[in-house]
Image (tube, helix red, strand yellow):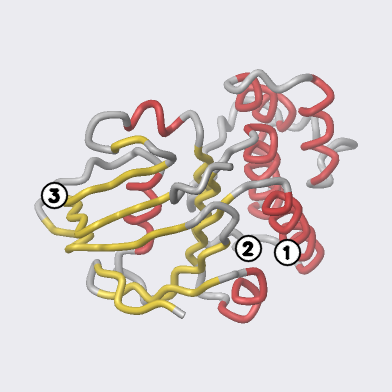
Amino acid sequence: METDPVVQLVDVVAVLDRFPALAGATLTVQRGEIVLLRGPNGAGKTTLLRLCAGLLPPTRGSAIVLGLDLSVHRQAVRSRVGLLGHSNGLYTDLTVSENVSFWGATVGASSDEIAAALDRMGLAARLSGVPVRKLSAGQRRRTALACLIARRAELWLLDEPHAGLDVAGRDELDTVLRAARAAGATMIVASHELDRAGALATRMVDVAGGQVRSAT
C-alpha cells in the first residue's frame, strides 16, 4: 500500500512578479485527506494551489507532489491533478459536453464516464449542447466540476469551489467531493465558507503571509 504523502512542501518559496507569494511554506498532505486552507485574501492560498498543480515553480525549498519533484517534473504533475480556480478553465466557444469530453479525453475517459460526469452535475439534459458562453455563473461552475470528475484526478485542488452555485448545487458538490474521497482522491480546498467547507475537511490549515502558520 502506498504510504508516501501526496503533497510534501518544505520551506517552499514561490515568487510572483518579484514578490514572494509563498515565503517558506511547509505542508504535508496524506492520501485521502481533505485539507481546508484558511486565511485572508492575499495570504498565499491560491498560490499554494497553483504550485501544487504544477503551474508555478518553487524558487527555493523542496516541493514533492504525487512523488514528483516540482523543480523538474511539473508537466507530469499536471496530468494527474485537477485544479478548479476562479476562471473555471473552460472553452467558451465549445458546448458543455464538448468541454467535458475534451478534458476527459486527456486521461482516456470513456463515453460512459463523460455521460456520468455530466449527469452527476445536472448537465446531461437541456444544457449539454449549450455553448459555455451562454451559461450562467453557476452553470459554468457545474461544467467545470464535471470536467474535474471526468479527468479522474488523484489530487483535487479547489479554490472557492462553492462560489456561484445555488444551494442545490452546493449540496451536490459536497456529495461529489465525499464520493471522490471515498474513491481514493485527495483534496486541498481554499475557501472562506468555513462552515460548509469545514464540514467536509478532515483537517484545517491556517495560511498567512505566504506561510502555513498552524494546523488543526
Mark 2 sits on what residue? 162
Q: On screen, 140 above or below 108?
A: below
Indicate left or right for 161 with 171 as reference: left
> Hey, which quadrant is residue 73 in on the image?
top left
Instruction: Please state the horizontal and vertical placement of residue 99, each as a whole percent of the image.
Output: 65, 28
| Residue in view at x 41 percent, y 77 percent | 215
Q: Amino acid at mark 2?
A: His
Q: Which mark is nearer the camera, 3 or 2?
A: 3
Mark 1 sits on what residue? 170
**C-alpha span from label 3 to label 1:** 37 Å
Instruction: Please state the horizontal and vertical placement of residue 50, each as a whole percent of the image.
Output: 37, 48
Instruction: Please state the horizontal and vertical placement of residue 117, each as a whole percent of the image.
Output: 77, 37
| Residue in view at x 83 percent, y 29 percent | 115
User: Under tag 2, what secondary structure?
Assistant: loop
Query: Quick one: 156 or 144, which is closer to the camera?
Result: 156
Task: Give the quadrant of the N terminus.
Answer: top right
**C-alpha span from label 2 to label 1:** 6 Å
Mark 3 sits on what residue? 60
Q: Are marks 3 and 1 in contact (CB under 8 Å)?
A: no
Indicate left or right for 22 with 78 as reference: left
